[in-house]
Image (spheres, rainbow, N blue to C red):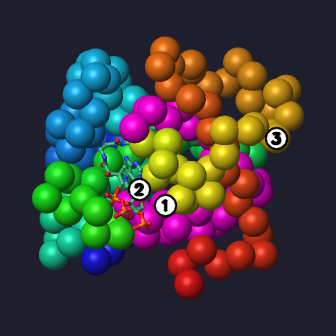
Amino acid sequence: IWFECISNDGSRENLMKLVHLKNIFSRQLPKMPREYIVRLVFDRKHFSYCLKKKDKIIGGICFRPFFEQRFAEIAFLAITSTEQVKGYGTRLMNHLKEYVKTMGTGIDYFLTFADNFAIGYFQKQGFTKTVSLPKDRHSGYIKEYDGGTLMECRISSLVNYRK
Ligand code: ACO
């Protein structure tokens, strides 16, 4: 398996990959309006961290780094149905934690609005419902979702999450 971070740079190659990932998100997150998924996945401020197996994208995380605030918001996360519960979701998140460290400016928190049925998954990835990130660092930056629970994960520079 491979990991690759892509964004909408206008290239045909990346657009095709983003369409594929957008379809995985739409199928796995049926309650999210399709147009909203399209908007964020193709928005240039959002990045998609993709998991590839045998050259095929089987899942990914769409996230938006807020460089000045030094956190990243996780907008969508999904693994295609036939590949779930095999540990890929965990590996994807661990690799993303290391990847954001390389993006500069010292991003040290993830925030997300977790669907209720995904809270257990996020807790296993080190996310908590208690948000310690000071409000002035995130308030007004991320979009609130009805029915979602705000969760955070602190990313430690001392830990190598890929190990
Ligand atoms: N609730 C509780 N525990 C879960 C859930 C869940 N919904 N999903 C996985 N887990 C557990 C697994 O049992 C496993 O536990 P273990 O380590 O004790 O064995 C652990 O979490 C990690 O499992 P993985 O196999 O790494 O997870 P997977 O590859 O299945 O990916 C994911 C998890 C991304 C949530 C996947 O199941 C999925 O795509 N679900 C549908 C879409 C979804 O719900 N996305 C998140 C919505 S919230 C958002 O996008 C911000």
Where disc 2 sits, the SS reads: strand
* Mark closer to the chain start, 2 or 3: 2
Q: CA distance from mark 2 to mark 1?
A: 9 Å
Of the pair 141 and 132, the residue shown nearer to us: 132
- Kindly identify the amino acid type of the residue bearing the numbered disc 3: Ser
Of the pair 146 and 6, the residue shown nearer to us: 146
- Kindly identify the amino acid type of the residue bearing the numbered disc 1: Met
Where disc 1 sits, the SS reads: helix
Q: Which x, y percent locates residue 94?
A: 52, 67
For label 2, the crowd category at 10 Å Cα-Cα, with few meaning under 14, some 14 to 19 and many 20 or more, is: many
From the image, tell me which residue sits under label 3.
132
Q: CA distance from mark 3 to mark 1?
A: 20 Å
Q: Residue furthest top?
A: 146
The span shown in magenta is: 89-117
Q: In the picture, residue 55 is in which quadrant?
A: bottom left
Give the quarter of the figure containing the N terminus.
bottom left
**Visible residue check, residue 18:** yes
Does residue 47 lie above or below 58 as drawn? above
Q: Which x, y percent locates residue 122?
A: 52, 50
Task: Name the residue rendered at 49%, 42% in the picture.
Answer: 119
Q: Which x, y percent locates residue 157?
A: 76, 70
From the image, tell me which residue sits under label 2.
49
Q: CA distance from mark 2 to mark 3?
A: 25 Å
Task: Name the residue rendered at 75%, 45% in the picture.
Answer: 70
